[in-house]
Every structure is written in structure tokens, then in C-alpha cells.
Amino acid sequence: MVILCRRMFRQLTAPLCVQIRISGKTGEIPMANVTELFGSMVFDDRKMQERLPRTTYKSLKKTVKNGEPLDISVANAVANAMKDWAVEMGCTHYTHWFQPMTGVTAEKHDSFIYPTDDGRIIMEFSGKELIKGEPDASSFPSGGIRATFEARGYTSWDPTSPAFIREKTLYIPTAFCSYTGEVLDKKTPLLRSMERLSSVAVKVLHLFGKNEVTRVTTTVGPEQEYFLIDKTMYDKRPDLIYTGRTLFGAPAPKGQELEDHYFGSIKTRVSSYMNELDEELWKLGVFAKTKHNEVAPSQHELAPIFETSNIATDHNELTMEVMKKIAERHGLVCLLHEKPFAGVNGSGKHNNWSISTNTGENLLDPGKQPENNLQFQLFLAAVVKAVHEYQDLLRLTVASAGNDHRLGANEAPPAIISMYLGDDLGALVESIVNGTEYKCKDSADMLTKVDVLADFQKDNSDRNRTSPFAFTGNKFEFRALGSSLNIACPNYMLNTMVAEELSEFYEELKDADDFEAAVKAVVKKTLTDHQNIIFNGDNYSEEWVKEAERRGLCNYRSLPEAMAHYVDKKNIDLFVKNGIVSEAELRARYEIELEHYSKQIRIEALTMIDMAEKNITPAVISFVKELTDAALAKKSLLPSISVKPETTLVEELSDELEKFVDKTAELKAAVSGASSANSDNLSQAMYYREKVFSLMGELRTIGDSMEQKTSAKYWPYPSYGELLFGV
Ligand code: ADP
Ligand code: MG
């Protein structure tokens, strides 16, 4: 994998010449410096080779590559080498960096100092400190799995993800669990799911005679969308500060209708932000590759080159953090919320996912003759069956208060999970199911009909941008993720469900007399039974909603609706059987998600009430007073003069203000009644969705209408125009 990525990175950097800031100056620098810059802040394979004794390096590699347990003497040597390198790089501290159930990463910094007998200090770091950290677990969400008095929690070094340096601190990627061993983070299930999928897939590949395969890994390339807005505007919006999205805001005269932002020329300020972001990410070993403007004004995207799932996860978390940090330096704020602005597109994340072997074979690559590639067909069948049987899990893993605004809103896939296979694979599935001959569309040449433009070969299938789960050549693109989501969750779901299907296939195939015939039968039966999940049409259309219902596919519109199925028996069985999480851990996760959702909606509602009472209502009153004064002044000057413009506005605004004040009171009552009305987290979350959230929508409608009528001089918050076009 590392070798593959290096090669790819060389390819990627070859034709480029980038702007790099060196000691404050910006200028064109030759490519060699970027290759040197890349990974300079990472304790990567090269540094390990240089700094570790050969035997230590070898046993560490065994752990990383084959998942073999780690010896303490190895850990001691690695810790020492890491510390020496970090101190040379100017570090004073180290931190165990982990991904608790909060939705953000956590870190506690310890210095390397160690007192000596003569009252001085030395810089020390032991294998024990590298392997195990002990943050207080009681302040992290545990879903009731652990009482507060059992406060101990442990972080445990993940040697498969390289340590790195940020701001004079050595960051050590770790997993997090409670004193009693319960998993309290997102990384552990991901690592377990990768191991589980690997062990099952290897067994299946051995049936195909591929005995040289010893490990299978899942790979992920997450495309990340984000908004950049001006910091001075942001600071004036409590809704953005507290909730990450605008809770009020009338549409600007211009939105995204001219389609002029997508792939548009990048503004200077944004471009210098992006350059610094690339530079910082490259230093951290992140393969930042593509950047462009997205559909909504002020919206952008960054796509990296794919890596193994757990490193891709760490790197995506890191990318989001670095995006926010770099923005500060440019007087900008990076918004990662799924729906910061109503009326224009929100932000998502495309999770490109595939499976490959340690021998370099991509198991989702159909090859030149997919009709004869039984191994590919079997893996494809496993994915099709998994997505069909566990569509509810895929739906709920992308559910969040923020993402609920996007799914099904014609800017993102619907809440209905289905798969797109494209023309070629679609035809293949049809031929297998119906037992007919497979006719592949010849991949035609693209004739440009301009002499100076080269003709080239077209891709086998067009893209389907509306599908939540689309096959794109040799990988699947899960497109329903929200922009702020930790990708560990969708990926451990995917890995686990595919591992489950493969293990079922393995059981059916392992003793077959005629292996080929048995594979064909399994593939045919699976694709026949599960073809209902395949849909190649327009996922945004109304007809699809009806058609999906006829097919019996789930359509869960909000987090509470989806989350209710987390603890369905079939889902508990899936995770328990595959050794990913226990039933208690799963139930804890369910409680955490629901509780988190209710808290988020509550914060949004309280912020709205605050904005309404403290600023919007007073602003409208002041403006109405100014209008009234103006009308009275006019009348006293010239009794016959018309004051219709003023009185009409006064009337309209007074009318709306009355409704606005009433609605604010109603919302307030709904929020304070929430805990007494509900006894468990699910009904509480449902209450927030059905009662509180819908009142928020009603309040906003009135507020936005008043904004459109109120003088900008009085309106207390920057407008959508200023926010979206202010950079
Ligand atoms: P597309 O143009 O179809 O979106 P790209 O080649 O641009 O495909 O890739 C989009 C994303 O998918 C990138 O992040 C890329 O690294 C990732 N990707 C490509 N191949 C794989 C793979 N085998 N596994 C996981 N991700 C992949
Ligand atoms: Mg893509």
C-alpha cells in the first residue's frame, strides 16, 4: 500500500509546480521541494527504517502488515526513536490522539520531561507510554455503559497509522476503551472490521487458488466539501458560532442558479488558503490531490488519493482540523456543517471504497471480461447482498441532525439506499439473473471532431450523480455521507456487512465438489434475490420514491426514524457474530447518537430563541418605530400627504412580529417541555424532530420574511448576500 501510494504520489506531482510559502515568502519553487516536504512531519516508514534497529523495524512491520501482536521491547525501541525524532523537530509534548463518540477527535498533551536525581530533567518516552494512555473516560459519551465512578479509560497505540507532529506535539493515533474493556471510540470497530473482512476474504480467495494472498485491506478516498466565509461576518452570527449553520437568513438575490461557481476560477484569497492547506496536509503525509469550487457560492472541495481505511479515516479527521486551523490564518472560517445555508447546496463527503489484496489486486475491478471473472462476480454479489440486507445500517450511519437537511433534498441522494452499477455491470447482472448472453457495450472512441484535439477512449459507463451508492469502475462511491461525519462509522458498517456475506458464501463454497458451478449458483441466486437494491435511474425523482416503496426499500427521513433500527435483532447479530462490538456496546452507541441528536436540536432551538428575543424582535420594533415617526412627521408637515408606504410596512411588520413573538414563545415552551414529555432517548429524539424542529422551521419563515422588509441598517445580522459572497 505504501509503495503504491508513493508511486501514485509521484505521478500526481510530476506535472505540477506549486506555490509554497518559505519563511513567509510566496514563490514558485521546484517540485523536488514538495517531494521533500511530503511527510516531513510524519514518523513514516523511511524514518523508522533509518532510526530503528533492523530487528525492531522488522517486527513492527509484521504487526502493521499482518496484524501480529506487538512486543514491549519493540515498543520501547520505537518510543525512543519517535521521541528522539520529535525532539529534534522541536517537540516538547506528545499526545494520544483518539476518536471518542463526541464526533470530534480528542487529545491530552503530556511533556517528555522526566526529573533526574540531581534536580535536572531529561526528555524520556517509554514503550509503556507509547502503548497505553489513561485519559479520564468519565467525561466522554459512553451511552450509560459505564458509571461515572468507573472513570478510567485507556488509549492504546494504533501502530498501523503513523505518528505525526503538529504544533510542537507528537501525535500518536490511538484507540479508546473503558477500564472494563468496552469500546468507547470509532477507530476500534473500524480496525476490527478490517481484520474481520481480511480474514474472511483471504479464505474465499484461497478457494480460488490464490494462496499467495495473506491479507486483504479496504481502501478509502474521501472527497471533502466545505464552505469558507469571512471571519468578521461569522463573528456576528451566533447561529454559526453555536450551531455551525444559519438558523435565520432570507435568500440573497443570487444563489447558485447561474451555475457559475462549480469549477469556476478560484478567488485569490481562497487560492492562497488552498495552497497553504495543501502544503500543511502534504507535510502531514496526506495525499491532497484535487481542489475546486463546488456548486454553492463559497463552497469548495478537496479530494485526496485513497489509502487503507484506517489511515484514510485518521487523515480525513486531520484534514478537517487543518482546514479549520488554516482558515483562521486567512481571516476565514471553514464551515463543515452539512447545511450551513438554506436554499443553496449543503456539503457532503463521498466515500470511495474498495477492497484489495496484499498482492496488489483490486477485488472490485471487473477486468476485461467480467462475464468470465467469477471471483469479481462473487465479491460484487457480496456487496449487492450486503447493501440490500443492511440498507438500514447504511442509512443510519450517515444520519445526523445536519445531514437530515440534505438527504432527499435534490442536492444529495435520497434517504432511500440503492445501488447504481452502470450499463456494463447492469447488463452483466441481467445476463446472470436471466441466464442470457452478456453483451458488453464496446467502449467507444470519443471523437472530438477537431483536428488539434486528440480523440480518446470513453469510460464504459456514464456517471450517475444521484445514486447513494454508485459503482465507479473499480470501487464504490458511497455518496450519502455528510461533510462533518467521521468516516470510520460508514466504513466499519460496510466492511462488517460485506465480511458477513463473504463468510456465508465461504460456508456454501468450501466443500463444493464443482467449485466453479457452485460459485455460479451462489452468484446467480444472490443477484436474483437482491436485484431490487439496484437502481440505475434518477434517484431525485418522485417516481423513484414510489418505486422504492413498491420494492420494499426503506425510506427513513430523519435520524430518529433511522436510528430506531440500529438495535434491530439482525443488526445486533451482525456486529456480535463478526466480533465488531458487543450488544451492550451497540446499544450504548444507539443511546449516544439519539442523545446527541436531541442535544443538537435543543442548542439550535435555544440559539434561535435567543436571536429572536434579544435581537430580531427589538430590531423590528425599532424599525417600525422609525417608520411610524417618519409617517407622523410627514403628516404634521403636510396633512394631505400620503403615508401609505410607511403604514403598509408598519402594518405588515407588526402583523408578522406578533406571529413571530407568539411562535418564539411556542418554541420556548416546546423546548422546556421536552424532558418531561419523554422517558427514553428515542422518544425524546422523535419529539425534538417532530415538535421542536418543525416549530423552528415555522419561526424561521416568519423571521426571514421580516428580514426582507426590514432596513439593513436595523437588521442585526449579516445577510446571506454578505455571508455567501463576502470572501
Ligand atoms: P472519479 O473521477 O470516478 O470520482 P477518481 O479517480 O477521481 O474517480 O477518484 C475519486 C476518489 O476515489 C479519489 O479520492 C480516489 O483516490 C478514490 N479512489 C480511487 N480508487 C480507489 C480505490 N481503489 N479505493 C478507494 N478509493 C479510490
Ligand atoms: Mg468522485
Image (cartoon, rainbow, N blue to C red):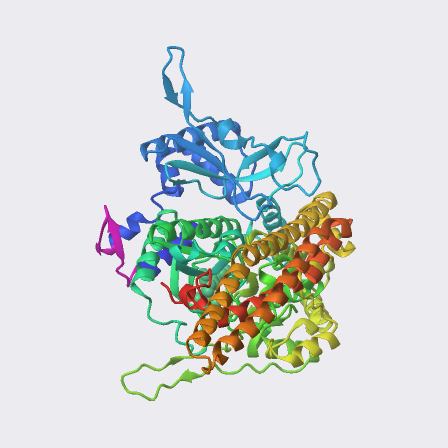
Residue 202 appears in the picture as rendered: no
* Residue 651 picture quarter: bottom right
Q: Which residues are magenta?
A: 14-31
Q: Is residue 364 above or below residue 314?
A: below
53 on left or right of 659 = left
245 on left or right of 417 = left
Residue 644 appears in the picture as rendered: yes
Residue in front for this viewpoint, 618 or 329:
618
* Residue 724 picture quarter: bottom left
Residue lying farthest to the top in this orientation: 118
Residue in front for this viewpoint, 619 or 128:
619
Residue at 66 percent across and 35 percent down: it is 181
Residue at 76 percent across and 49 percent down: it is 676
Residue in front for this viewpoint, 296 or 543:
296
Residue lying farthest to the bottom in this orientation: 449
Residue in front for this viewpoint, 673 or 152:
673
